[in-house]
Amino acid sequence: MTVNDVRDYPFDQPKALEAPPEWAAARGCPVTHVRTPSGDVVGLVAGYDEARTLLSDPRFNRRLDREGAARTATTEDGGMYNRENKAMSELMGEGHRRYRRLISPAFTVKKMEAWRPRVQRMADDLLDAVLAKGAPVELRSEFALPLPVGVICALLGAPAEDEDKFSHWSEVMMTTTKYTQEEVDEARTEFVTYAAALVAEKRANPGEDLLSELTQISDSEDGRLSGEELIQTAVGVLIAGHETTSNAIIKMTALLLADRALYEAVVEDPSLVPGAVEESLRLDPVGGLGIPRFIYEDIEVGGERVPAGTTLFVNLSAADRDERKFPEPERFDATRPNAQQHLAFSAGPRFCIGQTLARVELQVVLDTFVRRLPGLRLRDTPDDLRIRTGVVATGLEELWVTW
């Protein structure tokens, strides 16, 4: 393999809702070599079985602060995965299992489902404002971002008026090429300071929110979350709980409206909502960088040897289009029987602990749209949509809709 054989990654994507052809090519071999925005070469894993096996192997983690690990960003520290963090460094092996045991009771399916009525009220209030404003409306700024931010603020007990801060800090900290090291350092310092104050407030005056529950766990006899772990948990939940969910809302809506017969089918039969949500997650056309893994011992991936010291990126979106797992993978099928086996929320010991809440939000959004906006459609053509670039959590820049 020569330098010229290595493609830049993420791959160019002229049409936002069409997966890059390189994804299919990458599924043709266990590991493909690609170049990250930093210029470092990594292995790309795009097959479903290979991806799931790697994600489920507890020996390998996503922290890239070890010597020889690839950098993911153009900043001096190499990116969000490369920054050394003492609290997170202890969350490997038994440390990670302990951490998940402590926080999992706060994220049970029953507890997250209990939020459905409140999410519904928030969605209806936001849609009332959208309808009052009149068409056309830019859905990301008017609905898809405020809803998950409002939900996550209520969940954590954070002031909703701080939502603009969370969005800014999150985007800057997740940069690959968009922001400078100085901007990243400033955002991280402000975010951690904010989270520390929020944790301290919840410890002193606990309420009925998630963060208050976690601070009480840290003070119990059964286990203890350190102060730094609590702060990092708050930061992580605030980032993942709104940025990824808002992107998912926009991509789901765009996929259904790009081929409007798909949306009309759900309007005619709202029982398709859960299946349509799962299929939109599986068919996510914007994969970003994916999930990194640092390989610190020689392994085999799909029969191919991968030496210790290799950085691998698992492209979840590419793996979810593997025809060996999902027949006719490019076809949107809201009745697909195994759609929920997608990897949109990762897999293994580090699967997304907030996946139930994300599903609740997406189901509420789609159900609300098909009931109240049966005439919803794109203002522009699908080819006019543009991808947000320069950050880890990619999505669409904006989505203008009318009805």
Image: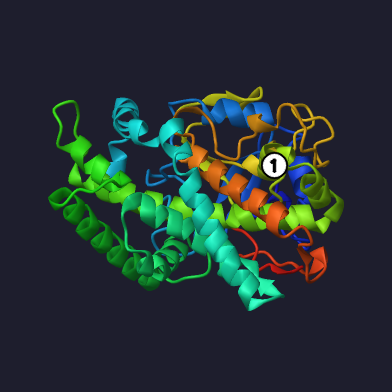
- Residue at 64 percent of width and 29 percent of height: 341
Q: Quadrant of residue 129?
A: bottom right
Task: Left or right? Give the position of 16 relative to 68.
Answer: right
The total of numbered circles placed on residues is 1
Task: Left or right? Give the position of 281 relative to 322.
Answer: left
Compared with 52, 261 (above or below) is below
Q: Quadrant of residue 127?
A: bottom right
**Depth check: 296 or 14 in front?**
14
- Image quadrant where one finds the N terminus: top right
Compared with 240, 333 (above or below) is above
- Residue at 32 percent of width and 27 percent of height: 101
User: Residue 366, position in %: x, y?
Assistant: 66, 50
- Residue at 78 percent of width and 57 percent of height: 257
Report whether residue 84 is seen. no
User: Residue 371, position in %: x, y?
Assistant: 70, 53
Q: Which residue is labeled 1 in the image?
A: 273
**Depth check: 32 or 330 in front?**
330
Within 10 Å of the Cα at label 1, are there few (<14), some (14-19), or many (20+) other Cα atoms? many
